[in-house]
Amino acid sequence: MGTKKFENVKKRAYQDVRPEIRTGDIFFASGNYAFSKMIKHFSDSMLSHVGFVFTWNARVLLLESVEDDGVRAVPLSRYVNDYNNSGEPYNGRLFLGRYNDELNMGKVSQMLGKAADILNRKYDVDEITEMLARVTLGLGVHKDDDAYLCSEFVDVCFKEIGIHFPRDDKGFIFPEHIAADGKVDPLFEIVA
């Protein structure tokens, strides 16, 4: 796949873009961590992670599924300033995109309800193994379960409001599939 639409978006400071961020905007990361590099390599993408944001009481929160915690909500500012309580920013690039469909995006509270229902569910480690087997050996197909990769989490939440992202021929979904969707418009790259 290898969508290029996020490569040359305008870089903007997080504090400057905060007022423009809307609930339902899609967060993408391109990490420099070993696990991130593996995802980028096997998905032929510059992107390694996806989640979506919501605003609440002047806060911008990110809903995501990560290896150590599963489905969680964290302040988006943590990626910019204090990733995983390290005192350092996320090691990689951060992007925001927006799904261009006002009719479905008008139902965003349903999407947030779905996300709340699956908060704290496990990260789907088994799915990573299955995807690697598919990519390297041509084996395996996706099976729905109660554990979520980052892209599966975003996909199931957006399906709640009638938005269906493409998957590969074996039913797997990567951050790349979501980014490549024709209705996902890049907004900007977030910098400190």
Image: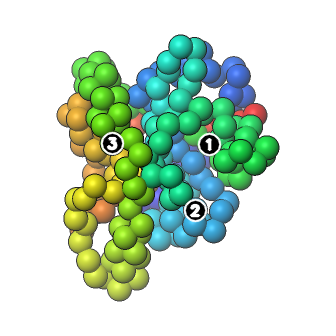
Q: Give coordinates of residue 128: x percent, y percent.
A: 41, 69
Q: Give coordinates of residue 173: x percent, y percent.
A: 34, 57
Question: Secondary structure under badge 3?
Answer: loop
Question: Secondary structure under badge 2?
Answer: helix
Residue at 24%, 39% in the rendered image: 159
Q: Name the residue under label 3.
A: 118
Q: Name the residue under label 1.
A: 94
Q: Mark 2 points at which residue?
A: 36
Give the left or right position of residue 192, taking residue 148 as reference. Answer: right
Q: Which of marks 3 and 2 is in front?
A: 3
Q: Which of marks 1 and 3 is nearer the N terminus?
A: 1
**Is residue 161 in view from this perspective?**
yes
Residue at 28%, 82% in the rendered image: 139
Is disc 1 surrounded by few (<14), some (14 to 19) or many (20+) residues within 10 Å?
many
Q: Give coordinates of residue 94: x percent, y percent.
A: 62, 42
Could you tell me how far apart the alpha carbons at marks 1 and 2 are, in whole angstroms?
A: 13 Å
Name, please, the residue furthest toward the front: 120
Residue at 68%, 51% in the rendered image: 92
Question: Secondary structure under badge 1?
Answer: strand
**Relative to 69, does residue 10 appear above or below in the rendering?**
above
Q: What amino acid does circle 2 point to? A: Ser
Badges 1 and 3: C-beta atoms under 8 Å apart?
Answer: no
Could you tell me how far apart the alpha carbons at marks 1 and 3 are, in whole angstroms?
A: 24 Å
Q: What amino acid does circle 3 point to? A: Ile
Q: Which of marks 3 and 2 is nearer the N terminus?
A: 2
Q: In which quarter of the image is residue 103?
A: top left
Q: What amino acid does circle 1 point to? A: Leu
Residue at 31%, 22% in the rendered image: 109
Could you tell me how far apart the alpha carbons at marks 3 and 2 are, in whole angstroms?
A: 24 Å
Q: In which quarter of the image is residue 116?
A: top left
Q: Which of marks 1 and 3 is in front?
A: 3
